[in-house]
Amino acid sequence: MITINKAILHILDFHSDIRVFSERELDTEDNSVNTFLAKHIEKSFKDSNLKTGKFLEGSQFEEGLIEYFYNRLDFISFSHHIAQRIHEVMEKSDQLDSMDVILADFVLDGQRMLGLLFCPNKIGFTHQVLQDTDKVKNDIIHHYAILPSTSQKLEGYAFINLSSLEIKFHDKKRSISGDDAYIIPEYIMQCSSGISPKETVKLMNDITERIADNYGQSTVMAVSKAKNVIVDNIQVSEDLDAEELGKQIFASSPAMQEEFVNEVKNAGLSNKVKMDKNIAIRLGKNHKIKTDTGIELIIPVDYFENKEYIEFINNPDGTLSIQVKNIGQILNK
């Protein structure tokens, strides 16, 4: 459940060299405005590519945020500071992308949050009504400032929990003064940048696959086991313990367990990795496999160890067969 408290939109049009900082908030009671904001916030907040961060010492964004939180700085003025900073940084980009910047104060599942949304301007077509002498003429023209639809992914976004000051963000790499950079963590928020849930799961799956292959075990079964273990553990705690995961994935081999923990550490992950429960379940519930004959299967991970549904059979000639069982109906997709 999302409740929008306040929101404001600023225009950064680098094609026309125009910036327009709004002096009034958006009408969040308007159904169209509320729907646009709520859908984009909800979609962006569920993104498995969201990285986590904490404000670095001396962050000007954090200083302004604290002033706003304690009502020493009003929402509109705070948003102007942010939009001005974004404009200053984006002016140095080798590729000037026009965008609208939205700042929103909202409540999500009981937590008060601040959201920053980058809405790139899309080029589209629209109609135009013209008066040609005594005749009305309808024409088709380019429109250079179309906002992303609610089904489209935004270019960048950040969310700050106003109680814990924990940051979640997604950004694309840009060239700023000739150097590649992520402007949200490096220039705007001035915060640390952790690994995303999607990257974490992929990293653990890659480590599992590598270890299983080194010890001559089935990489398919090992990775599906890893996904299942992650989903089971996240139900109990959002802190995934690498040592405990290794014990469960490679239950019969202490050597493989130890190698798993060492590989996780070498990859730069801490022994306890914090994961979002809903994202981890979504990433781990299915496993996709592809055969060298071109057949692709998407299988729920908890089916891999249940021979009532699927069985992997080693044939005498060294090939592998996959038997899918107890099917009541086959549907075209």
Image (cartoon, rainbow, N blue to C red):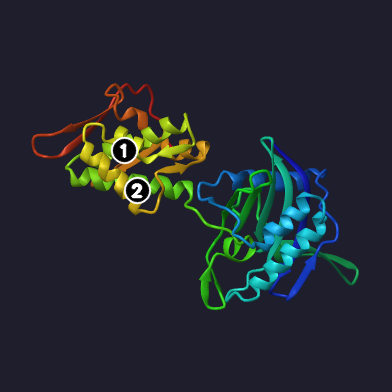
Q: Position of residue 191 (x, y in %)?
A: 58, 58
**Distance CA(mark 2)–CA(mark 1):** 10 Å
Is disc 2 surrounded by few (<14), some (14 to 19) or many (20+) residues within 10 Å?
A: many
**Residue that label 2 marks:** 264
Q: Position of residue 251 (x, y in %)?
A: 26, 32
Tell which residue pokes out farthest to the right in this image. Answer: 134
Q: Are marks 2 and 1 in contact (CB under 8 Å)?
A: yes
- Above or below residue 305? Residue 87 is below
Is disc 1 surrounded by few (<14), some (14 to 19) or many (20+) residues within 10 Å?
A: many
Q: Left of 146 or right of it: where is 130?
A: right
Which is more toward the observer, 181 or 220? Answer: 181
Which dot marks residue 246?
Answer: 1
Q: Position of residue 287 (x, y in %)?
A: 36, 38
Residue 103 in sight here: yes
- Where the C terminus falls, by quadrant? top left
Task: Give the structural element (helix, strand or loop) at label 2.
Answer: helix
Residue 125 in sight here: no
